[in-house]
Image (spheres, rainbow, N blue to C red):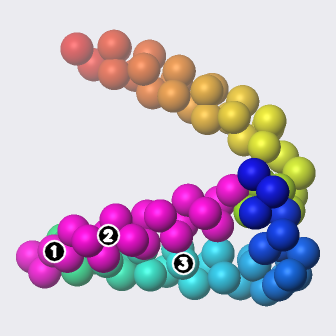
Amino acid sequence: MKIYKRIIEHYGTSNQKIKAIEELSELTFEIARDLQGNAAPHKIAEELADVEIMLEQLKRIYENHYKVELWKEHKLNRMEVRLNEST
């Protein structure tokens, strides 16, 4: 999507890397709240959306979208093998 490129150009790569760290931290906080029994499903959904947006920007910043997809496939296949071995 062109919007990701526009965001990166507007705010700069360094700022967006910092923003990604912030958004990951906010998601971590909401998951921790959930584990403590203080679930806020709407906040988790919001933070997940923020993190996904930032991940898309990071793939563009690092120009590694294809490599990320390959790693995801590799890791999911490996997990499938482990799951099959444990059943």
Compare marks 2 and 1 and give the one earlier in the sequence: 1
Quadrant in the picture for residue 84 = top left
Residue 86 image point, x, y percent: 27, 19
Secondary element at tag 3: helix
Residue at screen point 22% across, 14% down: 87
Above or below for 80 versus 4: above
Secondary element at tag 2: helix
Above or below for 19 versus 79: below
Residue 49 image point, x, y percent: 47, 64
What residue sits right under mark 1 in the picture? 39
Compare marks 2 and 3 and give the one earlier in the sequence: 3
Residue 54 image point, x, y percent: 64, 67
Amino acid type, mark 2 = Ile
Q: Is residue 58 visible?
A: no
Residue 25 image point, x, y percent: 49, 80
**What secondary structure prevails in the magenta region?**
helix
What residue sits right under mark 3 in the picture? 23
Residue at screen point 34% across, 21% down: 83
Q: Are marks 2 and 1 in contact (CB under 8 Å)?
A: yes
Amino acid type, mark 3 = Glu
> Is residue 33 toward the left or the right of residue 1 in the image?
left
> Is residue 39 toward the left or the right of residue 25 in the image?
left
Quadrant in the picture for residue 65 = top right
Q: Is residue 68 visible?
A: yes
Q: Is 40 in the magenta?
A: yes
- Which numbered dot is residue 44? 2
User: Alpha carbon of mark 2 to alpha carbon of mark 1: how far?
Assistant: 8 Å
Q: Which residues are magenta?
A: 36-56
